[in-house]
Image (tube, rainbow, N blue to C red):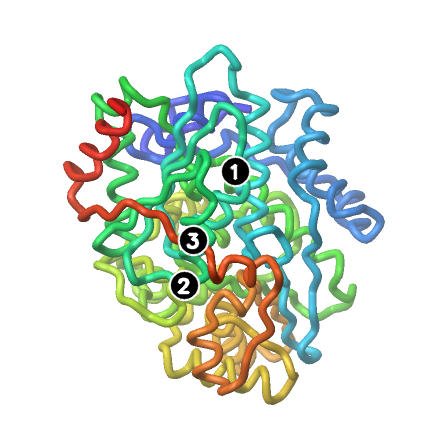
Amino acid sequence: MKLYSTNNRNNIANLKEAVFKSLPEDKGLYMPMAIPKLSDGFLKNLSKYSFQAIAFEVARQLIGNYIPEEDLYDIIEKAITFPAPVVNLNEQISVLELFHGPSLAFKDFGARFMAQLMSYLRDKNEKKITILVATSGDTGGAVAAGFYNTEGIEVFILYPSGKVSELQEKQLTTLGGNIRAFEVNGTFDDCQALVKSAFLDKDLNELYNLSSANSINIARLIPQSFYYFEAFKQLPQDEVKNVFCVPSGNFGNLTAGLMAKKMGLPIHQFIAATNINDVVPKYLSTSLFEPHPSYATISNAMDVGNPSNFVRMLDLYSSTWNDLRKDVIGFSVDDASTESAIKEVYEQFGYFIDPHAAVGYYAAKDYLANYANSRVVVLGTAHPAKFLDVMNDVLDKQVPIPEALAVLINKEKKATAITSSFEDFKSNLLNLVEQ
């Protein structure tokens, strides 16, 4: 598998180089040299394949012969160990539940695949790999769970202080072992900027073998395409147009869906559903991309003012605004509307929907008001119990807490507090080497 930088198509890397470097030196993002079309026979018979078999075929087409098929299937078999069911709310709106993995978030798919892939590709004689990851909520927990006790790999997670839920914070600060958390006095964008600066810092790269587990890493993006195929096989085969509504922050999830469409999955359109951090919906309406500092909302994992994967979206469409907006329609949803969606879904369907999927549900209803002959699948990106403060306030009702979260409540948080200054972060990393 060959990949190029979005900033320079002549900057080529193989899969191992792209996975472990995460970012090219020119500050672009890696993209596959080619996105293959899957066969019509495979696409028309998705219902005959297991989730793992679908994931294997998609990965095999993208990765090619870089990894032997037997080894690739072993990676898939170890990573994709939980389902992605489609739950119908009514005839027009469904939820694709992506929260049945160990950290109860969609990012378990990417994190577990990445952990298995890195473990497979890592040269056992090389020095330890240090993964840097910024999180606005769910990435940290998924990466912590996916890489916990993985031999030869340590993980440093950066998260914005006071801007993730209590249980999200416990997921990434209580494991210990090879997982270390940094509590940043700033926003998610500040955390993301620290990670990117570290990758470009000569001193840190001499001391650490740095890699990233954010969606900037192609190893996170590939497995996120799997569940679009898995969802599609569960939908009725009729004349209704199938639309996927993706609650979006850093836009890795939507980018993976666009890749699935490029591979031949007959998705009619995508809805890019954001909270008030709406730089992409505004771009889709105006052709102007104007990033800004992120604003805090109750759908905190989507509080991103400068989404990294936007450049990949543009790259898939050769930076052609008109082509991209044919496939993607943007909607922005404020907190009041998000709360009303949480209430409506529970009152009408008896279903608990988390604040991020609630943004998607509200956007889906807006979309259906103009496109009636459509079926919208909203991506349920996290279990609602991860956001108890919001859910219980909005519904005035206790959301059941899964055992995987209940065991965290009384665990002690361990995190290193730092400012948003790169020098502060760098000095902490330098001090760790000296210890």
Is residue 321 in view?
no
**Is disc 1 placed on a helix, strand or loop?**
loop
Q: CA distance from mark 3 to mark 1?
A: 25 Å
Query: 302 or 376: nearer the eye?
Result: 302
Residue under numbered circle 3: 251
Residue displayed at 28% across by 45% down: 416
**Is disc 2 placed on a helix, strand or loop?**
helix
Query: Which quadrant holds the C terminus?
Result: top left
Q: CA distance from mark 2 to mark 3?
A: 24 Å
Question: Residue 58: x percent and y percent?
Answer: 66, 39
The answer to whether residue 281 is above or below residue 432 is below
Numbered badge on residue 114: none
Question: Residue 38: x percent and y percent?
Answer: 69, 40
Question: Residue 127: x percent and y percent?
Answer: 42, 16
Residue under numbered circle 1: 148
| Residue type indicated by callout 3 | Phe
Residue displayed at 45% across by 21% down: 17
Check disc 3: other Cα within 10 Å, few if <14, some if 14-19, many if 20+: many
The answer to whether residue 279 is above or below residue 39 is below
